[in-house]
Amino acid sequence: TAQQSELIKNSIKSIPDYPKPGILFRDVTSLLEAPVAYATSIEMLANRFRDTGVTKVVGTEARGFLFGAPVALALGVDFVPVRKPGKLPRPTISESYELEYGTDSLEIHTDAINAGDKVLVIDDLLATGGTIEATVKLIRRLGGDVTDAAFIINLFDLGGEQRLNNLGINCYSLVN
Ligand code: PRP
Ligand code: HPA
């Protein structure tokens, strides 16, 4: 409901000039410190994707874990972590993505997604969409079917939603 979205929005602190002058940083750690609002955010995401046939939830290190894992538990499906390089113990595949300066990469366990899995991607925040584009590519390389990504916050002026729509991904966000 709009009231639930408002509760979540009001629990997210905005920090001026972090990490650099001129940036207004939306701080999701303040939502974690508001248990009713945090639980509401998990409930809203789980309700949206219950009975949609999702078989796995993928969350991206680190903040994606804080929302993806509870939603997977609420839906009764697997949680699959996408991690920064060198952190996953079984065989992996990797995708690089652009950062403001240079590139980084993300990895997933090769055996964590099977052909035919219907995968929901969850992260705390959508900015440029680079992180989730790399995550979607990893899932698709393993044969997973991914059409939806969900976020607590969409920084809509950074163009991430359009970028993901161009890849065939619908975006669902609790707060804009
Ligand atoms: C942040 C955030 C998203 C991503 C959004 O993660 O949690 O994953 O950036 O930006 P984008 O849409 O422009 O890709 P960060 O890379 O800072 O890592 P962290 O979760 O480990 O803090
Ligand atoms: N908050 C958190 N993470 C971010 C932001 C923000 O405002 N912008 C880009 N990544």
Image (cartoon, helix red, strand yellow):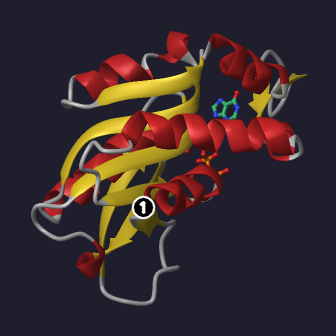
Q: Quadrant of residue 69?
A: bottom right
Residue 98 in sight here: no
The residue shown at (82%, 39%) is 36
The residue shown at (53%, 54%) is 68
**The residue carrying mark 1 has its beta carbon less than 8 Å from ligand 1:** no
Q: Quadrant of residue 110?
A: bottom left
Residue topped by disc 1: 106
**Type of amino acid at the residue the image marks with label 1:** Leu
Q: Is residue 168 above or below residue 56?
A: above
Q: How many marks?
A: 1
SS for tag 1?
Answer: strand
Q: Is residue 58 above or below residue 170?
A: below
Position of residue 150 measured from the top left corner of the image (x, y, whole percent): 45, 36
**Ligand 1 position by quadrant:** top right
The residue shown at (26%, 31%) is 169
Q: In the image as oriented, which residue stretches furthest toward the front?
A: 51
Position of residue 165 measured from the top left corner of the image (x, y, whole percent): 26, 23
Residue 82 in sight here: yes
Quick one: 94 or 35, which is closer to the camera? 35
The residue shown at (40%, 57%) is 57
Left or right, residue 8 beside residue 153: right
Position of residue 92 measured from the top left corner of the image (x, y, whole percent): 31, 78
Q: Is residue 147 above or below residue 11?
A: below
Q: Residues within 10 Å of mark 1 (few under 14, many from 20)?
A: many
- Which image quadrant: the C terminus? top right
